[in-house]
Amino acid sequence: MLMSQPQRLTRSFYDRPALEVARNLLGKRLVHIDDGRRIAGVIIEAEAYGGEEDLGCHCRVGRTPRTLVMYGPPGHAYVYFTYGMHWMLNFVVEAPDNPAAILIRAVHPVEGVDIIAERRVSQPAVHWTDGPGKICQALNIDKRYNGIDLCDEKTPLFVEKGEAVPDSSVTIGPRVGLNTVPEPWKSIPWRFKVPRYEVLHAS
DNA sequence: AGCACGATTAACT
DNA sequence: GTTAATCGTGCTC
């Protein structure tokens, strides 16, 4: 019997320019082994942040306790808290001392859907994981995972290989929510999205 | 110690 | 379209 190939993405995937990683995360599978249960979704929206010159990035203030993980090696999680109630999941990319990260903004649920439904009760299925805070609620991701290594086979949070998404299915535009950020950072097209993924993949 | 604000969400009118 | 919820972070005093 053939051994199954490892599916977890390795460090070299994250050790590339932020825009390249953000684009190539589309179609990959975000997985959380949550209390032994696989909760997973296909990544369908991601945004790149990086460089102290990027005034939309938290690292614009330099090294602080919060931003330090972005100055570390690629392939680690950067999880932060905002608006007093929401967790945001990012992946650190590029070389150490070159602060950059990818915000995961939306996924399409594929595993543990019953558990996702419980955690997103009172919301319709189309809104279960269509925002960065919603993903962390649905997949039960919080500060426990800030700084963890996504490439270590022992960690319960990681990204797996998936089906490639063609350029014809991808839209590129400005990042969301940077209302008070000056130009050009407010409008720079560092957001990558697969519109209508669930329609394209309807069975 | 106090302050203003935020890579959002859900529930409003 | 508007707005409340709610608190960690980084800055000023």
Image (tube, coloured by chain):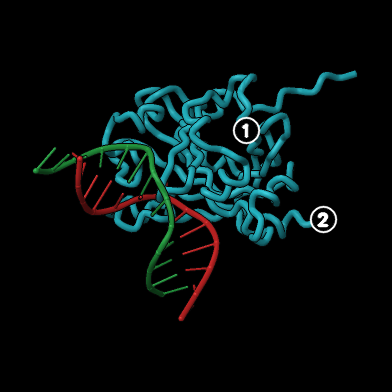
Chain colours: A cyan, B red, C green
Closer to us: A163 or A101: A101
Farthest residue toward the right? Answer: A1
Answer whether residue A24 is visible to the viewer in this image.
yes
- Mark 2 element type: loop
Residue type, numbered disc 2: Ser
**For the C terminus of chain A, which image quadrant?**
bottom right
Q: Quadrant of residue C10?
A: top left
Q: Are marks 1 and 2 on the same chain?
A: yes
Residue at left offset 29%, top offset 36%: A52
Q: Chain of mark 2?
A: A
Q: Quadrant of residue A125?
A: bottom right
Residue at left offset 73%, top offset 33%: A37
Q: Specify few, some or many for label 2: CA neighbours under 10 Å numbering under 14, 14-19, or 20 or more.
A: few
Would residue A52 be found to the left or right of residue A195 on screen? left
Between disc 1 and disc 2, whose residue precedes?
1
Residue type, numbered disc 1: Val
Q: Residue A138, position in %: x, y? A: 62, 46
Would residue A122 be found to the left or right of residue C5 on screen? right
Answer whether residue A170 is visible to the viewer in this image.
no
Would residue A121 be found to the left or right of residue A70 on screen? right
Would residue A56 be found to the left or right of residue A73 on screen? left
Q: Is residue A123 above or below residue B3?
A: below
Residue at left offset 66%, top offset 44%: A42
Q: Which disc, if any, is residue A203?
A: 2
Q: Is residue A12 above or below residue A83?
A: above
Q: Which disc, if any, is residue A38?
A: none
Q: Which disc, if any, is residue A159?
A: 1
Q: Is residue A90 above or below residue A197?
A: above
